[in-house]
Image (tube, helix red, strand yellow):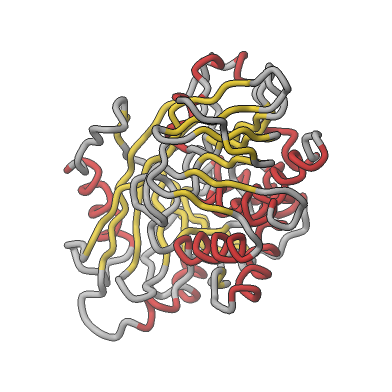
Amino acid sequence: MGYRPKEVDHVVIGAGGVGTATAFHLSETPGATLVLERFHENHAFGSSHGRTRILRTAYAEGSSYVPLVLRARHLWKRLGQQAKQQIFRPTGVLLAGPSKSTALARARESARRYALPHESFDHRGAEDRFSAFRFASGDSILWDPGGGILFPERAIWAHRRLAADRGVTFRWNAPVVRWKPRSDGRVVVETATRQYAANWVVLTAGAWTSTLVPDLHLPLSVEQQTVYWFRPRVPPRAPFREMPAFVWYTDGSRYFYGTPDVGDGVKIGGCVGQRVRNLTRRPPSSAREFHSVQRFSATRLPGLSSEPSRHTRCLYTNTPDKNFIVDRHPDFPNVVVVSACSGHGFKFVSALGEQVAKIVTTGRIPPLLAPFGLSRLTKLR
């Protein structure tokens, strides 16, 4: 390319949940921010769509996540006020599973450690409280009243619009080809048609992260999961509109999850996914995946139709330990890698954007992000 790169202060690569949140928080700081997205706005090819997402506070994946999710909930509420629309809806979250479930035990420990409001039920007590569900003898139930649902497309739109109002530039259909350090310490980011030079680069590229940092040899895997919407068999729809979000653990490490009917039916997904090795040739949804969700719905939510009204596919980028990556590149400290949220990251997006902006403005990793460093992955390869 025979022209000089356009000079900016910050380049964010990827305009999904984390990328737009980062851009929003960077817009509150000095400097010009540019966001480059390989697809169009609010696309359905990555990890930040699906109409509703779950926010849990009693966190089975580890109590270290609780301060981050509490901060995220506060920021979601604030974003809704700024955007003048509901982004977080407090429905509560029902966590259910066998009485010996280790996931339920970890969720209870998180709730106790941080003195979160919570209640425990056996199957009889749960049936009286949550009429849309069917419980069995031996089920154990944890009620997380501080949880709820998020509207991801609204959230991304709000972060993007408010950031753009403060001067952040978004470039759509602009996939990044490569980036490289420059002799003056800045980083040059190259698309197919343009180059940009920045003081800081933030990689929030989701499933495409490994292609942008091949030198790190990250042990990441990309998984595709399909979620389905099921309408009630017969009226009334009220029990399914008023039901909480839920995560239902089964034997071993399997689980199902869902959100209440906000217009399209009850959304249900599971952990039966498919490995994606080529991002340009994603597999179709599998019969195995659908039948597992269908069987769960028939058993636990028998008031729903057996056939879905719609479905969509999502990509999840997993680390071996299912914990996030948020860290500075070990060789280029003004490049921040933020990805691999392992299928449970969207609820944290508002707080991750805030904390990543702090990395850019201070050059240090904030305490809330300390568990997500790159160095731990060398032990997991």
- The location of residue 36, given as percent across then percent down, is 49, 43
Image vertical order of residue 147 relative to residue 282, above or below: below
Q: Position of residue 53 (x, y in %)?
A: 47, 59
| Residue at x 50% of width, y 48% of height | 15
Residue 306 visible in the picture = yes
* 355 in relation to 55, above or below: above
Q: Nearer the viewer, residue 311 or 96?
A: 311
**Residue at the spot x=75%, y=34% of the render?**
370
Res. 324 visible in picture: no
Task: Kindly identify the residue that appears in the image at 71 percent across and 42 percent down.
Answer: 64
- Residue extending farthest to the front is 2
Res 363 → quadrant: top right
Please tell me which residue is depicted at 34% across the width and 58% down the height of the picture: 268
Relative to 370, 40 lies left or right: left
Name the residue nearer the viewer: 134 or 213: 213
Task: Pick whichever, 313 or 200, lies toward us.
Answer: 200
Lateral position of residue 171 relative to residue 69, left or right: left
Side of 86 relative to 73 (left or right):
left
Residue 167 drawn at (x, y percent): 63, 59
Screen quadrant of the N terminus: top left
On screen, residue 153 above or below 362: below
Q: Quadrant of residue 174?
A: top left
Q: How many marks?
A: 0
Residue 145: x %, y % from top left: 62, 68
